[in-house]
Amino acid sequence: MATLWQLVGEHIPNDHSRQVHSRYYLEEELRAPDAPTLMVDLGCGDGASAPLARGLKPDVRWVGVDIMQSANARKIDTDQVVLYDGVRLPFADDSLPLIYSNQVLEHVRHPEPLLREVRRVLRPGGVFIGSTSQLEPYHAWSLWNYTIYGFKVIVEDAGLELEEVRPGIDGIALVRRQWFGRRPEHGAWFQKSPLNEEIDGWGVDTRRRANQINLRKLQFCGQFSFRVVKPGGPPRNRPPRAEPERKPPAPTRPTPTPTPARSPRLPFLRGPLRRVLRRLVRRAPRRRVRAVRSS
């Protein structure tokens, strides 16, 4: 059976393992020396990305796109907004350099035809960036959750190329946030969520590479961010990425006494959910040990 690493490992970056939001890729694109002068926000809602984009590149032309039923999009009167039927994008072939979509694809009724439309309207080398859901409870007419591998499959079936995926807020944090009523303090989890902090600690203790930590976070993330490109076109001139994170030569915290039977600490979980996740974590290494002994 193929592992997630075997299926998508080439798309998991090794420069850092921070939890990110779709804004991460928007900042990267609009701060580049050859940043596009036009961006389209697919599923623009109330147009929140317009001032964000202009803060990054003041001369960028922002165009919002949303379905005809979107009351929020209809209220926008300070920027250009185009309404569409949810599938056929009202742009010419090979005309757009950048499409941004923040937490929209999980609400799209026909995602595969829409991705084919994204390919059609992007110019060769054009970029499709954003985020979507993997392990997120139902919210606001949401239809789908995508595994990282499943997202790669439908992107490639549309004739696009998945370049990179990064983890966002963890799935358990999203469950807790909805269960407890979206308390104000839960907003901080979109910057650094509890399970991602646990995984960061595991990465330090075991001296893992950044891409290994990213892989673990992607397995349990509630949302993930992506960069997709249309094949062709000249190479982009993006700012150089930081060097891969260097783990300290020795753990920065005292090495715990080995206790094989002890479960990992999961202080942010309660009751049955904590016990289920502990069982999953405990079983994984045991299966690997049995596989080695039987080989």
Image (spheres, rainbow, N blue to C red):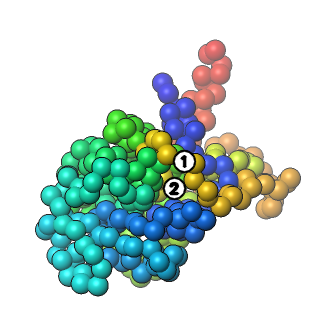
What mark, if any, has residue 167 been given in the picture?
A: 2
From this view, report whether residue 207 is shown above or below residue 292.
below
Please determine whether, in this image, residue 202 is positioned above or below residue 156: below
Find residue 62 and report its image quarter: bottom left
Q: Is mark 1 on a helix, strand or loop?
A: loop
Q: Which residue is at 14% across, 66% downward?
A: 68
User: Which residue shows up at 32% across the image and 70% down it?
Assistant: 63
**Residue 229 location (% of width, % of height):** 46, 48
- Pick the residue in front: 295 or 132: 132
Q: Circle 1 sits on which residue?
A: 234
Residue type pointed to by label 2: Pro
Q: Which of 251 and 81 is in front in this view?
A: 81
Q: Is residue 250 visible?
A: yes
Say which quarter of the image contains residue 253: bottom right
Mark closer to the observer (2, 1): 1
The residue at the far right in this view is 249
Q: Is residue 26 rendered to the left or right of residue 285?
A: left
Specify the quadrant of the image occupied by residue 96. Answer: bottom left
**Which residue sits at x=55%, y=32%?**
6
